[in-house]
Amino acid sequence: MLNPAQTVAIFQRQSNPLKVTPGTTIFEEGQPGTEMYGIIEGEVEMIVNDKVVETILKCDVFGEGALVQPEGTRASTAIAKTDCVLAVMNKERFLFAVQQTPMFALEVMKSYSDRLRKIKHFLL
């Protein structure tokens, strides 16, 4: 079974992944979001109110929240912690992947659930 980042890479529109260097802002909290990302290589920090709340690792996805929320805005800022290679998926392709590949949808939900559980345990 493919991990979520591999599935994003398969469905991405461009043939070349997005490469970013450490410190690069991938997206900003409160801004409109039209794409989600899968980490092929590297680590990405998620920041809320100027505080790192989690680090997303290779094979995971991030940014999907803006694709499913009615307002379509980012809930955090994503900054490359290391050199990163990212697969990018727009909303149209995301919806297609969810409809045509149920395991992709389940893996994205699992990723999101795992990350939420970590945050909940951190808060307690």
Image: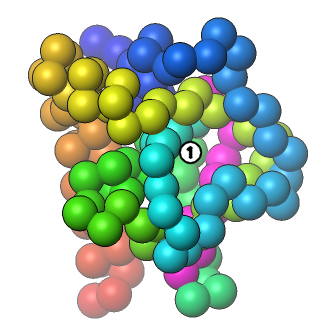
Q: Is residue 15 magenta?
A: no
Report the side of 51 relative to 97 (left or right): right
| Image position of 65 with respect to 4: above or below | below
Main SS of residues in magenta: strand
The percent coordinates of residue 62 (x first, y second) are 46, 49
Start and end of the magenta stretch?
40-48
| Image position of 102 with respect to 10: above or below | below
| Image position of 43 with respect to 65: above or below | above
- Amino acid under disc 1: Leu
Is disc 1 placed on a helix, strand or loop? Answer: loop
Which coloring applies here?
rainbow
Q: Which residue appears at 61% of the width and 84% of the height?
A: 51
The percent coordinates of residue 52 (x first, y second) are 60, 76
Q: Quadrant of the C terminus?
A: bottom left
Q: Which residue appears at 28% of the width and 39% of the height?
A: 108
Q: Quadrant of residue 11?
A: top left
Report the side of 95 relative to 35 (left or right): left
Q: Quadrant of residue 20?
A: top right
Which residue has dot 1 on it? Answer: 57
Report the side of 59 relative to 95 (left or right): right
The percent coordinates of residue 82 (x first, y second) are 79, 48
Q: Which residue appears at 54% of the width and 69% of the height?
A: 31
Q: Quadrant of residue 102?
A: top left
Mark 1 closeness class: few <14, some 14–19, many ≥20 residues within 10 Å: some
Q: Is residue 103 visible?
A: no
Exactly how many numbered labels are in the figure? 1
Q: Quadrant of the N terminus?
A: top left
The percent coordinates of residue 107 (x first, y second) are 25, 33
Q: Is residue 89 visible?
A: yes
